[in-house]
Amino acid sequence: YLASLRRKLVELVELESSEVPPSAQYVATDMTLDEFRILVQEFALDGLTEAQVFYHLMPRLSLPAQMPMLRMMIDEFGSGNLKRSHTTLYQDLLSELEMPLDLPFYVEANSSAGFTFPNMFCWLAMRADDPSWFAGVITYFETVVPFFFECYTQLCERLQIQAHTYYSEHVHIDVFRAIEGQRLLKAMDVSGDLDPVKAWRGICMGREITNSAFDMAVDKA
């Protein structure tokens, strides 16, 4: 069952990497600085709370499954270096764009698109009936981010954004984190905790929510 899940994931990723959505193309080549501020605003709730909800998942995993998850979290939090944590990198971006750093501002300012992504991870980590949902989503997400975030890195280069590390770091490091996602699936499978059907449903749900949130945010910008 794990082999079948992995095969379907590979096919999905190949499909996604073969085409650039119009919204991503617009971000890469045409989005203005003011429009980019709105896009950054819409994902600030996630950026300012990056991976903190993952702590709630850990007790739900077997010890072997916690290890790849822990390695992903260590990266999220800059290997214990506050300056390299992904939330700090997002704050650096907000500062360069002369935008507020306080979370309550974005709770008030954001449209529904800004809430869907963090809400998804809250549900996956805290409320889903099985961690297989999360395992599917995180493996999918870490696999597609290296090419999904290319539109951001191209925009930052075009608009000469200096605090681009939040995006460029993900493009680089998520290649390795995708491997940890596969190890998470494997560890759960070995212990009998992986439900491949729920993992696949998680992948499909994560894909739909992520793409929809991005498109809505670009439309708002």
Image (cartoon, rainbow, N blue to C red):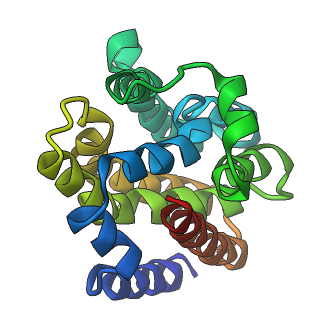
Vertical comparison of 95 with 9: above or below: above
Residue at x 38% of width, y 88% of height:
11
- As displayed, is residue 85 above or below residue 162? above
Q: Name the quadrant containing residue 197.
A: bottom right
Residue 203 coordinates in the image, percent (x, y): 59, 72
- Residue under the point 45% across and 79% down: 9
Q: Is residue 142 left or right of residue 69?
A: left
Q: Residue at x 38, y 21 (%)?
A: 95
Residue 51 locus on image (x, y percent):
57, 35
Between 124 and 101, the residue placed more toward the observer is 101
Choose between 32 and 92: the one closer to the eye: 32
Residue 68 in sight here:
yes
| Residue in the image at 66% along x and 69% along y | 202
Label tally: 0
Q: Position of residue 33 (x, y in %)?
A: 31, 46
**Which residue is at the front of the view, 208 or 69?**
208
Q: Quadrant of residue 208?
A: bottom right
Query: Where, by quadrant of the figure, is residue 188 drawn?
Result: bottom right
In the rendered image, the vertical position of residue 162 relative to residue 194, given as above or below: above
Q: Is residue 18 left or right of residue 66?
A: left
Q: Is residue 220 left or right of residue 205?
A: left
Left or right of 110? Residue 24 is left
Quadrant occupied by the N terminus: bottom right
Q: Nearer the viewer, residue 178 or 65?
A: 178
